[in-house]
Image (cartoon, helix red, strand yellow):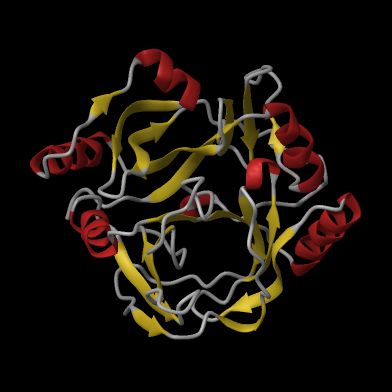
């Protein structure tokens, strides 16, 4: 397949209080705010040499704006556009101004079968080598691995799962099935999927709806101490946790989950499993964690 997605390059979130994200992104998460690109209604956060990885835009409600999926070059980008059109999916080409804001050569917008918005693009532009975390985080784990992963709702799990495999070129990493959240409800099922890079998963599909359109996203750092320091900042600020510190079974990540502005859950982790995407054999799991990760519901 010539149109395999290479990474999750950026995420846009719509927020009803953009100002709350400014201190949360810098003082809690350690991201670098691009002061030149940002304004009162749009915040552009950097994690590395890319112009932006996390974008916060003003809106009337809190919800996922889009996921930005990168393709290796113009040929791969045009191939995925052809696959989307062959699948009968509506695709809207982005304009020059939008490409400039995203720091990409070309992009297009669409939605998956569960209604989740996403963008496809090729060739990141405006790369810079001046990244500096305001909290002296040495480096986020990005590069060819992309910015991290996102978990999105997909109640029509089988249909959405097949779409990401056959149209966007994802591979399977793990199929996690857990006991139902309430008596009479179906089992919880999370389908973890990898792009054409070593990160264990760049996307996961959750078989229940979610009011924000995003179950969580992850930021991965290079040391356990940086995870611990962030947890200290979260607790000092009195921010709620969706999950305590723990280690996942399938991707080995040691992490905790903080509830950010608007109810968005951010996983902050270290030591995620890296795989060979060409040879990795997908697993099936019935346990989510080796230890820790005591979960609490989020009020949104």
Instruction: Work out which quarter of the rendered image holds the N terminus and state it.
Output: bottom left
Given residues 128 and 15, the one toward you in this image is 15
The picture places residue 24, in percent across and down from the top left corner, at 76, 41
Q: Is residue 295 left or right of residue 173?
A: right
Please name the residue shown 47% across and 53% down the image. 210
Please name the residue shown 71% across and 56% down the image. 258
The picture places residue 202, in percent across and down from the top left corner, at 44, 58
Given residues 88 and 6, the one toward you in this image is 88
Task: Residue lying at the far left in this picture: please name it.
Answer: 86
The picture places residue 292, in percent across and down from the top left corner, at 69, 80
Given residues 113 and 167, the one toward you in this image is 113
Q: Is residue 179 left or right of residue 121?
A: right
Q: Which of the 4 image quadrants contains residue 100?
A: top left
Task: Residue lying at the far top in this picture: please name it.
Answer: 97
Task: Residue lying at the far right in this picture: please name it.
Answer: 236
Q: Is residue 6 left or right of residue 159?
A: right
Q: Is residue 116 left or right of residue 253?
A: left
How many labels were placed on the picture? 0
The image shows residue 204, relative to residue 104, as above or below, that is: below
The picture places residue 3, in percent across and down from the top left corner, at 22, 48
């Amino acid at each position: 397949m010539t149109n395999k997605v290479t990474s999750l390059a950026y995420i846009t979130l719509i927020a009803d209080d953009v100002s709350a994200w400014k201190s949360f992104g810098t003082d809690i998460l350690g991201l670098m705010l691009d002061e030149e690109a940002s304004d009162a209604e749009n915040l552009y956060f950097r994690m590395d040499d890319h112009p932006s990885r996390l974008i916060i835009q003003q809106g009337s409600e809190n919800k996922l704006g889009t996921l930005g999926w990168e393709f290796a070059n113009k040929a791969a980008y045009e191939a995925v556009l052809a696959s989307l059109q062959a699948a009968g999916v509506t695709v809207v080409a982005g304009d020059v101004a939008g490409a400039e804001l995203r720091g990409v050569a070309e992009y297009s917008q669409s939605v998956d079968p569960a209604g989740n918005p996403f963008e496809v693009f090729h060739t990141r532009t405006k790369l810079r080598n001046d990244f500096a975390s305001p909290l002296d985080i040495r480096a986020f784990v990005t590069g060819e691995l992309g910015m991290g992963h996102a978990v999105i709702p997909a109640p029509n799990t089988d249909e959405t799962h097949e779409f990401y495999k056959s149209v966007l070129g994802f591979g399977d990493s793990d199929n996690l099935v857990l006991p139902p959240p309430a008596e009479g409800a179906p089992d919880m099922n999370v389908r973890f999927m990898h792009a054409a890079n070593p990160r264990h998963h760049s996307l996961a599909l959750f078989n229940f709806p979610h009011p924000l359109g995003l179950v969580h996203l992850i930021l991965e750092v290079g040391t356990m101490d940086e995870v611990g320091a962030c947890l200290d900042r979260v607790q000092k600020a009195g921010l709620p946790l969706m999950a305590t510190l723990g280690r996942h079974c399938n991707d080995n990540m040691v992490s905790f989950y903080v509830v950010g502005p608007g109810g968005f859950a951010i996983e902050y982790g270290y030591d995620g499993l890296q795989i060979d995407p060409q040879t990795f054999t997908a697993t099936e799991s019935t346990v989510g964690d080796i230890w820790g990760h005591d979960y609490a519901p989020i009020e949104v």
